[in-house]
Amino acid sequence: MPARILDGSAYAAEIRTQVTREVAWYNAHHGAVKLCAVLVGSDATGRLYAESQRKLSVKVGVEYELIELPDSTAEVELLAALDRLNADPTVTGIILQLPLPPHIDTAVAQYHIDPYKDVEGVNPANIGLLFYGQPIIAPCTALAVTELIRRSAVVVRGAHAVVVGQSRIVGRPVTMFLLTQEATVTGCHIATRDLAAHTRQADILVVAIGQPRAIGTQHVRPGAVVIDVGINRITEQSPDGRDVRRTVGDVDFGPVSAIASAITPVPGGVGPLTVAMLLRNTLEAARKQLRRRI
Ligand code: NDP
């Protein structure tokens, strides 16, 4: 039987509806919820990404401002800009668009965002607090993965979860989240020997490696739940010989969906939920800042 498709877009729409209602209430009683994104340099993708953030923010009633700094911005100048946003009581959430120019240390800049305004959950303080099961604001993609699993009624407690890819922002927080939900978790990474021998043990397989279609049927136990975090832009030849640009995941969706019990599509799986989590985190940040003030 083909896999159940875990529809991240539909779950994201439900979350946005709820966030819209709650933001309206918050705006009316406590003042506007506002997101500020900082973009350093002239990266066109960063600007496109910011534009889509703006549209989605405005749709749920969140104000959005993009602060653009030149490529030549020194690290100390970026930190000063972040300090100003940290201190500004009208700013609820701060997003730092990546990649930063190579002369700026990304981790140093992320560490500079007030953990209460860190709506992407990238400050090491927030990632570290995952160990205690209580981040102030949790990393969006890890939240999206666990929200998808929860809404799909997949049982995590006692399941064997395998997470492939152990980046600081995605793979490791997902690993930690699943551990705190009492799954037995195997963390696979670039040095893992015989990857398939591990992934074939998984009841829940989460893949976040940034390698198009790298995970095939040889990696998946029939009946497993497969969560594909990867977003890869590739060029393929169409049957009539034209180059076609496509977005694909880290999992070879067609064959794997024939043996998995449930699977996320790309696009339309984890991606839209990550953005919904960003908006929910922004509302959560507003509430936490309010509680910090009173
Ligand atoms: P990174 O490149 O930061 O991390 C990928 C990790 O996977 C690295 O630790 C890398 O190891 C490891 N890796 C690479 N190849 C393999 C392999 N064959 N086997 C095991 N481990 C491997 O990427 P991110 O974690 O930020 O993102 C991962 C993917 O998820 C990307 O496609 C990204 O676009 C996507 N993404 C999607 C989001 C969403 O909302 N759906 C949000 C964020 C990211 P090493 O560094 O040693 O090579």
Image: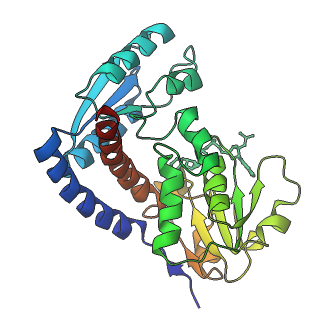
Q: What residue lies at 24% left-to-right and 63% top-to-bottom?
A: 17
In the displayed orientation, state which residue is furthest to the front. Answer: 294
- Residue 93, position as x, y percentages in the image: 34, 35
- Count of residue discs: 0
Which color scheme is applied?
Answer: rainbow
Q: Is residue 47 above or below residue 102?
A: below
Which quadrant of the structure image shows residue 178?
bottom right
Q: What residue lies at 45% left-to-right and 26% top-to-bottom?
A: 113
- Residue 180, position as x, y percentages in the image: 64, 59
Which quadrant of the structure image shows residue 18?
bottom left
- Residue 257, position as x, y percentages in the image: 59, 77
Q: Is residue 93 visible?
A: yes
In the displayed orientation, state which residue is furthest to the right. Answer: 193
Using the image as rendered, state which of residue 214 and residue 150 is in the foreground: 150
Q: What residue lies at 30% left-to-right and 67% top-to-bottom?
A: 14
Q: Quadrant of the N terminus?
A: bottom right
Which quadrant of the structure image shows residue 42?
top left
Using the image as rendered, state which of residue 109 and residue 224 is in the foreground: 109
Q: Is residue 237 visible?
A: no
- Residue 160, position as x, y percentages in the image: 73, 71
Q: Is residue 187 left or right of residue 170?
A: right
Q: Is residue 259 above or below residue 111?
A: below
Q: Quadrant of the C terminus?
A: top left
In the displayed orientation, state which residue is furthest to the bottom. Answer: 1
Q: Is residue 252 above or below residue 285?
A: below
